[in-house]
Image: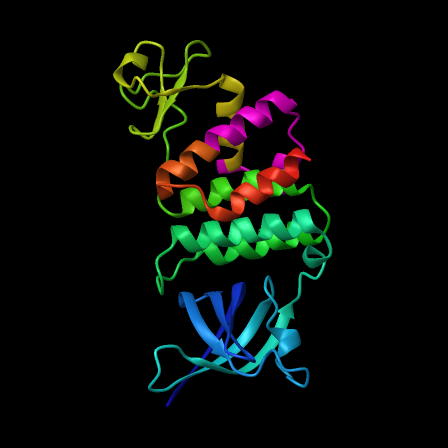
Amino acid sequence: MSLTKTKGVIIRATNLREADRILEIYSDDLGKIRAVARGVRKIQSKLAGHLEPFTYVDLMLAKGRGDLPTITGAKALLHFSGIRKDVERMASASYLAELVSRLNPDEQASKRFPIILRDSFEALDTGHEPAQVVAYYEWNAVTAAGWQPELQHCVNCYQKLYPQGLSFSLAAGGVLCKNCIELDTEAITVSPEAIKLLRCYSTLSFEEVEGVMVGKDVRKETNQLVDHIVKYTLDRAPRSKAFLTHLEAM
């Protein structure tokens, strides 16, 4: 039996048999992994309080003959307990966790994804507007997965973008100028303000983006564009996004 020590964010829990759980964890150094927490659903379990979803935890894993390692030790480092007190914050965290899980293959380490998860959960935990947290970090998750759209120049002719007649081509991976729009009949019309907001998402911190004055219509347009990008990247939208969209509409 081999032992492995790691730290990571618990992004999903699935019940197994009468008292166990399978945990999906995004590890700082191992990427996305799954492990079994045996007996964690028993009242007397000492590990239960350390292995809640959306918790950043220090783990000891034991790998035996089975397919999945077993968690033999756990100590919560950050609980993010404020997330679990509000349904919209929980739905937002669930969506971001599923998005990262879908974007990143198993056991493929990433420097950016652990930071995105911890930073987004901290923002949700400390009272920031959930919709703004999701908008900023879902864009950063998509770009962390390697999708780097061209936002500064026309993706086809590479000329400087002017405010009129812009569209976004999912197939080409960026903005088309008015002279190149006919190259993609499915390109999405986009305002220069929405492109500017995406540039802010790419270059500024979350706190800096929060201070940017943007109208509701521009935020809505930008969110819809990012939704299209996520669906295009994953072939379909994450399941948790539908519930989050329902909550936001209430």
Q: Does the magenta portion include 12?
A: no
Residue 176 % position (x, y): 35, 19
**Magenta region:** 202-226
Give the quarter of the figure containing the C terminus.
top right
Residue 119 % position (x, y): 59, 53
**Identity of the residue drawn at 63% across and 77% down:** 48
| Residue 7, above or below 143 | below
**Identity of the residue drawn at 50% across and 30% down:** 198
Q: In the displayed orientation, state which residue is furthest to the front.
A: 18
| Residue 47, above or below 183 | below
**Identity of the residue drawn at 38% across and 54% down:** 104
Q: Nearer the viewer, residue 137 or 25?
A: 25
Q: Does the magenta portion include 205?
A: yes
Q: Nearer the viewer, residue 177 or 234?
A: 234
What colour scheme governs how the chains and residues are painted in the rendered image of this protein?
rainbow
Residue 73 in the figure: left or right of residue 88: left
Residue 61 % position (x, y): 46, 81
Quadrant of res 233: top left
The answer to whether residue 147 is visible is no
The answer to whether residue 91 is visible is yes
Q: Nearer the viewer, residue 77 or 229?
A: 229
| Residue 206, above or below 216 | below
Residue 135 % position (x, y): 56, 38
Give the quarter of the figure containing the N terminus.
bottom left
**Identity of the residue drawn at 43% across and 12% down:** 162
Q: In the displayed orientation, state which residue is furthest to the bottom.
A: 1
Q: Main structural element of the magenta stretch: helix, strand or loop?
A: helix
